[in-house]
Structures are given as structure tokens and as C-alpha cells.
Image (cartoon, grey):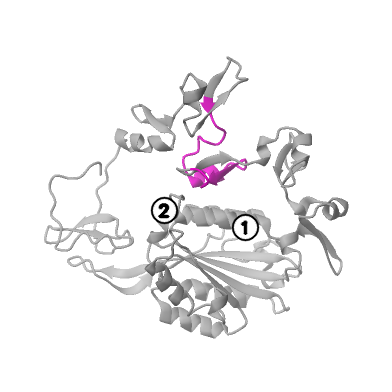
Amino acid sequence: MAGKPAYTNWLGGQPSAELGQNFAAITPTGQWNDMTRYSTAVAGVVCEWGGVTSSCVVENGYGYKWLTAGQCDVVKCTETVNEDCVQNLYCEWNLTAPAGEECQLKPCAEYPDEITCAQDEDCMFSTAVSPAMCVQKPCPKLKTEEECNQDSDCMWDTVEHDPAKCVEKNCNVFNKCDCKQDVECFWKVEGDIEMCVNSNYGECPTMDIAVIFDGSGSMSRAFGRHPNGYYALIEMLRQWTASIALSGEPAGFGINSQITEKTRLAVIQFSGVPEFQDPTTGAMFGPIVDDVARAPSNVGAGGHFSGVLAEADADWKWHENNFLAGRTYIASALQTAANLFKAESPTDGRAKLIFMFTDGVISDLDDASSVVSSLGNSVQRFGIVLRRQAAVEPQDLQAQVAMEKVVSFPPSDH
């Protein structure tokens, strides 16, 4: 709804603005209450349809302005002198433009948020500037093979790109000679298998990793200069996934996985809300629902263990578009991971790991502790508490205390 209504009729103590309660509802008494999108007490909905000009004007600081009715478009960098142009974070002065010197939009600056920015392989979301924005990656800026090869973080790619272009270095595509000449790469020999891998992961054992990450409503808040912590976390994990030495085995291999000294990955989102809500008081109660999410079977790895980058990346993209936005309930996700290890991870000595990411206090700690007790020492569990600011706040310490109950011993390692 645009603007603040002149008339309100909230229940006493409402709106409570608890996590996930982002929808206004009319109770049987005629008074208002805020509820979650999962509430079973709501019988119907009213929607506002159509564009509101102010919603676009608000985005002006991020490079957008209202042009015509129904259309919000990118600022076109209309400044006419160099000094004014470079004051605009989104613009640069082009000395070689076809029509003469002019102010133009920087590469990648047309993408307004972290999700759209990530869809372009030449772009990255930068928090080095304020406000954070989408910028061009360093390597694609280098337009010739000579310039590219002079940068140790880049490589001139003629295999995946036609025409060839400068991209971020990927050790996996190097032959033995090129691999051994690059200090950031490592030629790994394991039995009959030889491969070039990133030197950071050269000594890693065979691993199956389940990544369990927080999809609770609090993750949608700003984290530092990231306007949305949920998307920031996913993009960080997507970049990490692209850097590790994946096995190349698709999700269908399951427990028949045979490739050693490489990694498979499974992606699981956790959250959830109590199933019922009192229509009068707004109190939540009952069993927890919508507390775990994996990509469906027709998308990427479908939430199963996979060593194929394209499958893992498709899972991450699916989660970007399917944010649970409930509360911090993790037990079902841990149980899902436990079931995956049992059904799909062979007992061949490989390391079995769970990485957990959250910004809040685990709400179902007793149930979660019961699941990890059943895992014993067969699966190592690592926990990471995400802070919204650099300074440690009381809620961060509370989240840490809760996380220590479900990580592997000793918790001080985390």
C-alpha cells in the first residue's frame, strides 16, 4: 500500500512486526493484526495493482528515475561536463565516444541489485563503495591478450568464450605444463587421476559437503553495505562453489560416487513458522511448517549431492528466487542432511561435512541437538554466525551460544 493510511484499527499491541509478519489481516472482530504469509486463519486477500511513481523515485540513489507512466528506467548520465559526470557514482566520462566526449553509464551499473548483477558473468556486487553497487570485474576490463596475461588473477579464455576474452583464472582448465607454471594452481595426482586445482584446495581430501543456510526473515535485512543479507550470502557461496575442486559427478551418482580427492555439494535452506496463528491475538502455535527447502528434482542437483558446477549453480539460483522468510528453525534441515549422507554418501573414507550459516538464535535447539547426536562423529559440523555489523552485538553472542550446541567438538574451533 502506498503511503500511511489515515485510519487505523489495530488490535492492542499490534502490529507486532515479528519476523515474517509482513501482511495485514482483518480479524473476526473487525480489528487489524499483522500475520505471516503462512497463516491458515486468512480466508482471502486484497491486492493493490499498478505502478506507484514514488517507488521508483526512492530508487534514484541507486541509479534509477521515473521516465514515463509505468516505466522506471536507468539514469542515463546526462551530465555535460567531466567534473559533474564523475561526481555521479554510476557514471564515467568517455573520451572516445562516437559522438565525442560524453558522460555514460559505467559497465554493470545498470543492474540495480545483487541478484540481477550476479546474472552477468562480467559483473560483481561491490561493497567497497557506498552505496554498494554492481561494478565490472577486473579481468573483463582487460581487452587484449597481452594485458590479460600480465595480471596474475586473470587468464585469456579461448575455450569457453568465442570471441576470446579475459576472465578470472580457473585452474581446472589448465594442462599440466600451464598448471605447474602458475603458483596459484596445483597439479594433483591421485592414483590414475591427474588434475589441475586451485592451490588452496590442493591437499583437500574427498569430501561430501551439505551447506545448510538461513532463510529466516531476518536475513533480508541489510548486512554492512549489502542491502539484503540473504542474497549476499547466496552470492558469496556461489562464488565459493565455483572455486572448489568439484568431482564432476552429476547428482544421479548418489552412493555410487567413485571419484576421489574432489568435492560434491548439497544445498539446503532452513526456516519455518508454527502452523497456526490465533486470529485475535496473533500468537503462533502448533507444529513447524515450511521449515526446509531444496531445489525441485527438475532443477540443477535437486538438493542432492552433486560435483557438477552447473547443477550446484542452478540450485543456488533457485534458492535466490525461493526465500522462505520464516523464523530460525534448523532441525528439519539437519535431518534432511543426515538422510542425504545415509542415502548418498559412500563409506569409503571420504570426509562428510555440514556447514551451517545463520544470523539468529536457533529456535528449535532441542530438536536440532537430538539430530546431531544421532550423527555422532561420522559427520563433522561447522557453524558460522553472520553479523549485520562489524561490532559484535548481544544477539550475535546469543546466536553463537546456540550454534555451539550443534557444531562438532570443540566449539571454540568455530
The label number, if any, that marks residue 222 in the structure image: 2
The picture places residue 309, in percent across and down from the top left corner, at 66, 56
Query: What residue did someone put label 1 on?
Result: 240
Label whose residue precedes the other's in the sequence (1 or 2): 2
> Which quadrant of the figure contains the N terminus?
top left
Q: Nearer the viewer, residue 90 or 191?
A: 90
Q: What amino acid is found at the position of numbered circle 1 in the picture?
A: Trp
* Left or right of residue 48: residue 356: right
The picture places residue 331, in percent across and down from the top left corner, at 46, 75
> Which quadrant of the figure contains the C terminus?
bottom right
Residue sitting at 43 percent across and 49 percent down? 227
Residue sitting at 27 percent across and 46 percent down? 47
Instruction: Establish if 379 lies above or below 14.
Output: below
Find out whether residue 264 is within the magenta segment: no
Q: Residue furthest top?
A: 99
Find out whether residue 120 is within the magenta segment: yes
Disc 2, SS: loop
Residue range (magenta): 104-129
Instruction: Establish if 255 lies above or below 26.
Output: below
**Residue 157 visible in this rendered orientation of the protein:** no
Q: What amino acid is found at the position of numbered circle 2 in the picture?
A: Ala
* Left or right of residue 329: residue 235: right
Find the distance from the CA under tag 1 to the CA under tag 2: 21 Å
The label number, if any, that marks residue 93 in the structure image: none
Mark 2 packing: few (<14 Cα in 10 Å), some, or many (20+)? some
Mark 1 packing: few (<14 Cα in 10 Å), some, or many (20+)? few
Q: Nearer the viewer, residue 220 or 412?
A: 412
Residue sitting at 34 percent across and 34 percent down? 57
